Image (cartoon, rainbow, N blue to C red):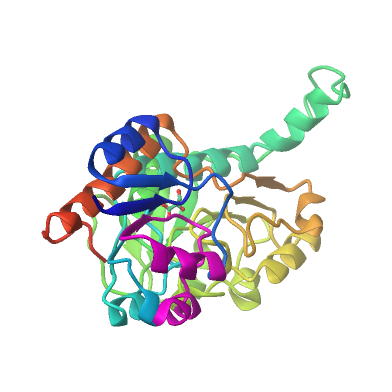
Amino acid sequence: MKTLLITRPIADPVIAQARTLFDVTVNEDGALDVAQAAQALADYDAILPTLGDQFTDQAFESAAEKLRCGMLGNFGVGYNHIDTVAAKAAGVQVSNTPDVLTDATADIGMTLLLATARRAGEGERMLRSGEWGGFGPKDLLGTHVTGKTVGIVGMGRIGQAVARRCHFGFGMDVVFYNRSAKEVGFPARQLASLGTVMEQADFVVVTTPGGAETTKLIDAVALEAMKPTGIFINISRGEVVDETALITALQTGQIAGAGLDVYEAEPHVPEALRELDNCVLLPHLGSATVETRQAMGQMALDNIIAWSNGDAPPQAV
Ligand code: DGY
């Protein structure tokens, strides 16, 4: 029986199925650092890793001749924690879990957009602290969402799902920035530059993949282009945004607010960000529904099973 390491507890039925096919170890001790990832590559035939596990080039280098693993069936659509070039060079296949989390992640984008625009975080904090004095016609006035312009940065599956919700649900105009030309089946205008999208949008929603090509794509210059009433949402990866520049933009009122699900050095969230009232901060909840997390686990396992049977993993990256 092949050995399989599942690097974090996932849905019970998926683990139960995995146990019928593999000799399974479930790691209960949190994300693997580089040394632990290298050890795992040496110890297991297959690994089901996830966000935070450090499968860097150094991990592959350290495993080197001891390498036993042939497959990393990643739990998550984003796989920027795996050096896929090093994996390929080492002969390790990698897969991810696209599609199954698109709707859940787009829903978190809308949760953040609405919560930030309508100051839901501030309101909830006020109520829970016993400071609410009753309805006030001028209290906690937010920004209207319906009919405004949303700017999507990265019009992939999740970007399109957010755009559809904005257009069909909230009558919003959709503009977007995408590196390649993109046709979508609903009204949305692709603009020539990121700067123009940042300038025109009332709400900017970042939905690009992470990785070297998008690191700090949203920098101080991009943020400066936003309207002072603009609201910035990030549901992609923390490193896509220069977090220090974002904090400055929020502190100085250069932009009106931010809704964030992801951070540069998760789980660390800078105190300066946590102190700001004009942002809503979630702990990377994009795909966090029971149904979605089960589907992600199943898809990751199905890819490992395909590899184990000598077939091409259907979601190979
Ligand atoms: C992903 O799948 O990449 C998400 O960020 C984790 O839910």
Q: Residue 19: in sight, yes or no?
A: yes
Horizontal and vertical percent for residue 267?
65, 54
Front residue of 79/104: it is 79
Residue 209 falls in which quadrant of the image?
bottom left
Which residues are the magenta region?
A: 35-64
Q: Is residue 168 above or below residue 316?
A: above
Q: Residue 314: in sight, yes or no?
A: no
Q: Is residue 170 above or below residue 134?
A: below
Horizontal side of 116 relative to 7 (left or right) equals right
Residue found at x 62% / y 56%: 230
Residue found at x 61% / y 38%: 115
Q: Is residue 50 above or below residue 128?
A: below
Number of dots carrying numbers: 0
Residue found at x 64% / y 36%: 118
Horizontal and vertical percent for residue 160?
33, 52
Q: Is residue 280 above or below residue 91?
A: above
Horizontal side of 31 relative to 253 (left or right) equals left
Horizontal side of 283 relative to 103 (left or right) equals right
Front residue of 235/55: it is 55
Horizontal side of 229 relative to 153 (left or right) equals right
Horizontal and vertical percent for residue 212?
47, 78
Front residue of 67/241: it is 67
Front residue of 23/81: it is 23
The quadrant of the picture occupied by the C terminus is: bottom left
Magenta-colored stretch includes residue 45: yes
Residue 47 falls in which quadrant of the image?
bottom left
